[in-house]
Amino acid sequence: FYLQYLGRWPEYCQMALGPHGRAMGYILGKAESFPKHADSWHGHVTAVTVAPEARRLGLATQLMNILESISEYADNCFFVDLFVRESNKVAMDMYRKLGYSIYRQVIGYYSGEEDAYDMRKALPRDVEKKSIIPLPKPVHPDEIDD
């Protein structure tokens, strides 16, 4: 699954190396759009992971900034989005500090067991910030592209 990302969107796959070449963190993402929406071209964060010993050093912020820059400058996206578990308050707080807000709740997104929040950050192309106006009600996974 992730090997597809590396082959198709290599610029969205970044790794941070520590001393002696050890992987300390990575981010995987892609550029995509929703077929029914003309101004939905966006960067998507599929995964961002930082080794426990490298946390709280700003590495996740740096990785997110790289993906946002690629989305903005290379692909001229309207926004960046990601999905986060409803129970992952630490990650949600970090994303909020980076300028992300909850766009919608996705019922049962994680194997039907837990809801997700679709969090978004508008990029300069979205002058009116339409891409981050929260939806009034939750959606189900099969409605994400609608």
Image (cartoon, helix red, strand yellow):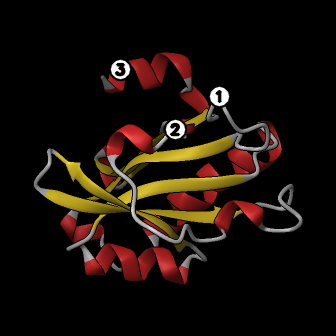
Which element carries disc 1, helix, strand or loop? loop
Q: Residues within 10 Å of mark 1 (few under 14, many from 20)?
A: few
| Residue at the image position 39 percent from the left and 83 percent from the top | 93
Say which amino acid is labelled 1.
Pro
| Residue for badge 1 | 35
| Residue for badge 2 | 145
Q: Which one is closest to the eye, mark 2 or mark 3?
A: 2
Label annotation for residue 146: none
Viewer-side residue, 64 vs 35: 35
Is 93 located above or below residue 3 in the figure?
below
Which element carries disc 2, helix, strand or loop? loop
Residue 76 is left or right of residue 121, and the answer is: right
Residues at circles 1 and 2 in contact by the CB criterion of under 8 Å: yes
Residue 120 is left or right of residue 140, and the answer is: right
Q: Residues within 10 Å of mark 3 (few under 14, many from 20)?
A: few
| Residue for badge 3 | 3
| Residue at the image position 55 percent from the left and 40 percent from the top | 146
Residue 132 at x, y = what percent?
A: 65, 67
Is 86 located above or below residue 6 in the figure?
below
Say which amino acid is labelled 2.
Asp
Mark closest to the chain's N terminus, 1 or 2: 1
